[in-house]
Amino acid sequence: MKKTLVAFATLAAFAGAHAEVAITGVLETSIYSKGGATSLVPGTNGTEIDFGVSEDLGNGLKAMGSVALLMNPYDGQAPYGNAAIGDSSSTAPGSTSLYNSYVGLSSSVGSLKLGQQFSPSFFAGAVGDIGGRNGLSSYQAGGLTGQVANSATITSASFSGLVVQYQKVLNNSITAIQGKGYSGYSLTYTNGGLTAAYAGAKNSVYSTTTSGITEQVYGLSYDFGVAKVSAGGSAKNTAKSAASGVGIAVPFGAITVAVGTSKQSTTTATDYGVSYGFSKRTIGYVGMNTTTGASNVTVAGIRHNF
């Protein structure tokens, strides 16, 4: 459920008009067990509060922006990167972090967003992963990075189901995966229950020991109504480069049973999950993961969207 507010005072001082502010979010925590050790984790998506703003500028042009505040309700530490300091790593300091935060413009032909955003490869990988690249998925064929700080992203409108996206890092001082010379792109086609996506990315410097990276990620899914199937793969110029995976999710009323398996080199990972929808906004779930050479993982959690 989305709660929409109309903010007049501050924004009107700058724009001479009002903007719509949408407040949405998710509350989630899971009990996570691996190798005899049990802990609490953010779950599939983590806990966040999202503030989205939009303003009609006339002639089909809109201003838009988003600020996502993330936190762990069980220890108060920031679970993901902090866009406020240009850090998209998992060790960003602070009790809360800014995630997927940007400002931009949109029109009938597409949009431009500036800030910290999801990568085109992340979305392509999510199409092939029956788990949607959530935080508990062990899918082996996703992209190398999910969030890209200091980036500009151009996304086209849908033309007969086809959407084109291009992303470029604007800070050449970063020497991480989302670093010097980083750029990514994707092509996504949607028609009814079918979604197909292809993405690529490259950068000129990955670390002090690697000259750069390139990757290609693809995903395909089809929702038959009685079941949803997915398949995907990736190729990278790094160790264990080639990977592929398949998955299926079958709904039985409020219950959905899903299984996905993927392989990269000699590593095979399989995720099993059962979710129950208490309502349209509250879901409980249990799951298990088996990965070659690693202890089995079990998880149980609850997620509430608002």
Image: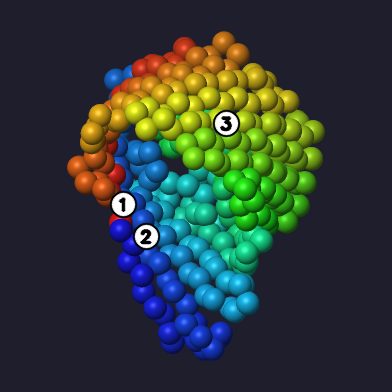
Q: Are marks 2 and 3 in contact (CB under 8 Å)?
A: no
Q: Nearer the viewer, mark 2 or mark 3?
A: 3
Percent position (x, y) of residue 14?
Answer: 56, 85
Residue neighbourhood size for the residue with mark 3, other residues' Cα within 10 Å, grouped as few (<14), some (14–19), many (≥20): many
Q: Disc 2 marks which residue?
A: 24
How far apart marks 1 and 2 lie (CA) works out to: 8 Å
Task: Please name the residue shown 74% across and 38% down the image.
Answer: 202
Q: In the displayed structure, would residue 11 be above or below residue 45?
A: below
Q: Earlier in the sequence, mark 2 or mark 3?
A: 2
Picture quadrant of residue 44 = top left
* Secondary structure category for the residue under label 1: strand
Seen in the image, is 260 located left or right of residue 235?
Answer: left
Residue neighbourhood size for the residue with mark 1, other residues' Cα within 10 Å, grouped as few (<14), some (14–19), many (≥20): some
- Which amino acid type corresponds to the residue marked 1 in the rendered image? Asn
The C terminus lies in quadrant: bottom left
Residue neighbourhood size for the residue with mark 2, other residues' Cα within 10 Å, grouped as few (<14), some (14–19), many (≥20): some
For the view shown, which residue lies furthest in the left direction? 278
Percent position (x, y) of residue 198?
Answer: 65, 35
Q: Disc 1 marks which residue?
A: 305
Q: Are marks 1 and 2 in contact (CB under 8 Å)?
A: yes
Q: Nearer the viewer, mark 3 or mark 1?
A: 3
The N terminus lies in quadrant: bottom left
Q: How many marks?
A: 3
Seen in the image, is 153 located left or right of residue 205?
Answer: left
Task: Please name the residue shown 41% across and 30% down the image.
Answer: 224
* Secondary structure category for the residue under label 2: strand
Q: Disc 3 marks which residue?
A: 219
Q: In the displayed structure, would residue 75 be above or below residue 170?
A: above
Picture quadrant of residue 152 = bottom right
- Which amino acid type corresponds to the residue marked 2 in the rendered image? Thr
